[in-house]
Image (cartoon, rainbow, N blue to C red):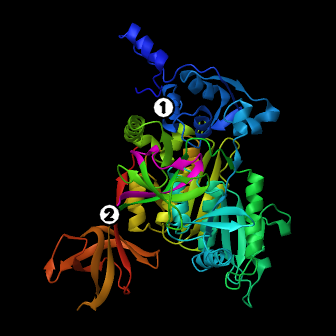
């Protein structure tokens, strides 16, 4: 166990008198009294106590409490941590919980250092609905007012000035990166702007983006774009939003909406005003005098400059020369570049920057903290790496069979990501599983839609401890690989009552071990050859894994299964073979099927017995 205590004169004198004594407490006893609310997140507790989140989680684990960074704990659990660190605490009065949660300690002079910080905004939406055009318009209109400053794309994050206040925009490739960062335990975004085209309305990807924003639990502003088009119908968009439990203010709800045109610039000022309004209500504040803490947005290895990281400072001020640790990496800040590509000496709260000086490339989502010296930075990074290795099993998502162990304890909600072949099936399956909710446990469908299971579905499931359900659809090979890497369970069903039975049995703690469907290989049909006996031969290229003669196979067309059988013959040129691997060409016939089309996918699979 390493100690974060800083050696002082008194400590040195004590060591001289009793050289054999070893200090085992994490910190020296502090005289201050920390006021904490009745409930708070683990990350908030780490901020209040000034401890590393990993150290807080380790203290909870020593007391038999498994909790993630964003999990809520009560006051009694929190005192187990504060006592170990030698911190005296008192619980906030009910009427002062809000203010107590925002205060670092009970000392009032620390509140005086808090100042408003820029809100961090992520823009989400369908690929054709104008996200990029909206950012481009904001860039042009705001930078036109000033020669230097505004927003730029130099480091993947923008900062705009509006009415004397800064707004930080994260340049992410849509909701996938938005959720990927959250999947690593970091809440980076303060506000999500959902862009919906006024002429198209809600599209499947719009709904997916909305569900990602809901899962991240951030305020949502709806930007109804393309109001300049003749077919613009904002009322239809608002009606579609209401069907997704998102009621805009015009319809009596509490969600702010703005009608804009990224092409003409109309409504942009109103959108920025709404962003500042939501930020003001959220009371986003930070203390620039504190040691900096933030989140790595993206990172890369530059051949000339070494590891570089784009980060966002949440609290404190990051300065050149600071010793930092982030995830399993550490270093000393050698250079800082702002969004204009200019070298700067420090980064205030709510501001993005590019930093050089890490010993290795950190990961997106890693939390960055400033520490007193290089030894502390290195030690914290090594401890996090060991902790991540030892908790690898704990960090994966829940499996359906493990609901057996959770249903009688603190587990109150089963999260699902549901994909089916057509929209009608989606609605039927969703309605069936949601009726299984009871008083003690709720089945919650985070996202549902037609089509194959994608990487985005897996990342959403990982970020929300959800299970992915595929009803008569397969998973993309890349999604399968990502699910295996992130520990997300994907379950496939063809019969609806088997699906509902499994979930119901799991909720009641009676789910028996099941056989899991495993895709072992895929082949794409490139050509079709008729044989002498009227049997079609599919000329295929194996694109993933391997396929075997006699293997069970599904024939997929446009992401939907149209037939299921076995591989009757498998040939390489004229030679009969038993197996073909990825990258090779082969001829295939399927038992009982004779209606191949170019572009069809042959999906070889097998059943594996699931482990409880």
Q: Is residue 320 magenta?
A: yes
**Image quadrant where one finds the N terminus:** top left
Query: Magenta region, mostly helix, strand or loop?
Result: strand
Which quadrant of the figure has residue 422? Answer: bottom right
Image coordinates for residue 137, horizontal then vertical, percent: 65, 78
Q: Provide the residue span drawn in magenta.
A: 305-332
Residue 478 image label: none
Residue named by callout 2:
304
> Residue 42 occupies which quadrant of the picture?
top right
What percent of the width, then of the height, locates residue 204?
A: 60, 73
Task: Please tell me how crowded label 1 is: few (under 14), some (14-19), or many (20+) other residues with Cα within 10 Å.
Answer: some
The percent position of residue 268, horizontal first and vertical second, equals 73, 75
Measured Cα–Cα span from mark 1 to mark 2 = 38 Å
Residue at the image point whose x is 48% and y is 45% from the top: 401
Name the residue beneath numbered marker 1.
Answer: 58
For the question of whether residue 240 can be seen, the reply is yes
Which residue sits at x=50%, y=50%? 184
* Horizontal side of residue 468 vs 45, given as left or right: left
**Compared to 429, does 391 lie above or below?**
above
Question: Which residue extends farthest left?
Answer: 575
Q: Is residue 550 at least partly visible in the picture?
A: no
Q: Secondary structure at mark 2?
A: loop
Q: If the image is split into quadrants, where does the C terminus sit?
A: top left
Residue 228 vs 407, above or below: the answer is: below
Estimate how packed mark 2 is, as few (under 14), some (14 to 19) or many (20 or more) residues with alpha carbons within 10 Å.
few
Please tell me in which quadrant of the rendered image residue 110 appears.
top right
Circle 1 SS class: helix
Seen at 32% across and 63% down, the residue is: 304
x and y, in percent, of residue 101 in the image: 71, 37
53 and 515: which is toward the camera: 53
Residue 225 located left or right of residue 486: right
Which numbered disc, 1 or 2, marks the residue that appears first in the sequence?
Answer: 1
């Amino acid at each position: 166990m390493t100690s974060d205590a800083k050696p002082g004169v008194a400590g040195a004198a004590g060591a001289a008198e009793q050289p054999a004594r070893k200090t085992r407490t994490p910190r020296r006893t502090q005289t201050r009294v920390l006021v904490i609310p009745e409930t708070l997140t683990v990350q908030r507790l780490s901020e209040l106590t000034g401890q590393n989140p990993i150290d807080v989680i380790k203290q909870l684990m020593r007391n038999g409490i498994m909790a993630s960074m964003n999990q809520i704990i009560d006051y009694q659990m929190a005192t187990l941590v504060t006592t170990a660190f030698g911190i005296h605490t008192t619980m906030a009065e009910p009427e002062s919980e809000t203010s107590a949660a925002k205060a670092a300690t009970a000392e009032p002079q620390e509140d005086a250092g808090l100042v408003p910080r820029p809100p961090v905004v992520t823009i989400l939406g369908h690929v054709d609905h104008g996200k990029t055009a909206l950012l481009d318009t904001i860039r042009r209109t705001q930078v036109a007012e000033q020669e230097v400053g505004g927003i730029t794309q130099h480091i993947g994050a923008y900062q705009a000035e509006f009415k004397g206040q800064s707004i930080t925009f994260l340049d992410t490739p849509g909701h996938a990166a938005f959720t990927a960062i959250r999947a690593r335990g970091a809440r980076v975004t303060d506000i999500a702007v959902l862009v919906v085209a006024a002429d198209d309305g809600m599209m499947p990807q719009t709904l997916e983006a909305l569900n990602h924003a809901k899962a991240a639990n951030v305020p949502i502003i709806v930007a109804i774009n393309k109001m300049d088009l003749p077919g613009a119908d904002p009322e239809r968009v608002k009606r579609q939003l209401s069907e997704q439990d998102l009621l805009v203010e015009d319809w009596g709800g509490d969600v702010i909406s703005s009608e804009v045109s990224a092409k003409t610039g109309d409504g942009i000022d109103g959108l920025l005003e709404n962003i500042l309004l939501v930020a003001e209500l959220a009371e986003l504040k930070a203390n620039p005098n504190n040691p900096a803490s933030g989140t790595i947005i993206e990172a890369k290895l530059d051949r000339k400059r070494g590891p570089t990281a784009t980060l966002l400072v949440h609290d404190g001020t990051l300065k050149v020369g600071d010793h930092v640790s982030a995830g399993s990496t550490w270093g000393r800040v050698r250079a800082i570049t702002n969004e204009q590509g200019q070298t700067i000496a420090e980064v205030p709260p709510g501001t993005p920057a590019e930093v050089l000086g890490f010993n290795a490339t950190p990961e997106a989502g890693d939390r960055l903290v400033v520490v007193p010296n290089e030894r502390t930075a290195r030690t914290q990074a090594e401890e996090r790496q060991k902790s991540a290795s030892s908790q690898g099993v704990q960090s994966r998502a829940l499996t359906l069979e493990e609901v057996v162990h959770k249903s009688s304890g603190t587990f109150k909600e089963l999260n699902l990501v549901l994909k089916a072949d057509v929209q009608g099936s989606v609605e039927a399956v969703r309605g069936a599983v949601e009726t299984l909710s009871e008083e003690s446990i709720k089945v919650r469908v985070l996202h549902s839609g037609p089509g194959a299971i994608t990487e985005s579905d897996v990342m959403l499931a990982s970020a929300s401890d959800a299970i992915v359900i595929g009803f008569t659809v397969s998973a993309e090979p890349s999604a399968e690989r990502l699910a295996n890497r992130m520990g997300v369970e994907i379950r496939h069903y063809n019969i609806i009552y088997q699906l509902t039975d499994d979930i119901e049995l799991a909720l009641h703690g009676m789910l028996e071990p099941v056989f899991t469907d495993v895709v072992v290989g895929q082949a794409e049909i490139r050509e079709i050859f008729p044989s002498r006996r009227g049997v079609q031969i599919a000329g295929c290229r194996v694109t993933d894994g391997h396929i075997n003669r006699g293997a069970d196979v599904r024939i997929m067309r446009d992401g939907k299964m149209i037939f299921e059988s076995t591989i009757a013959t498998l040939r390489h040129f004229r030679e009969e073979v038993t197996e073909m691997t990825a990258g090779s060409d082969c001829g295939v016939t399927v038992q009982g099927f004779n209606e191949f089309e170019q572009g069809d996918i042959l999906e070889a699979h097998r059943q594996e017995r699931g482990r409880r």
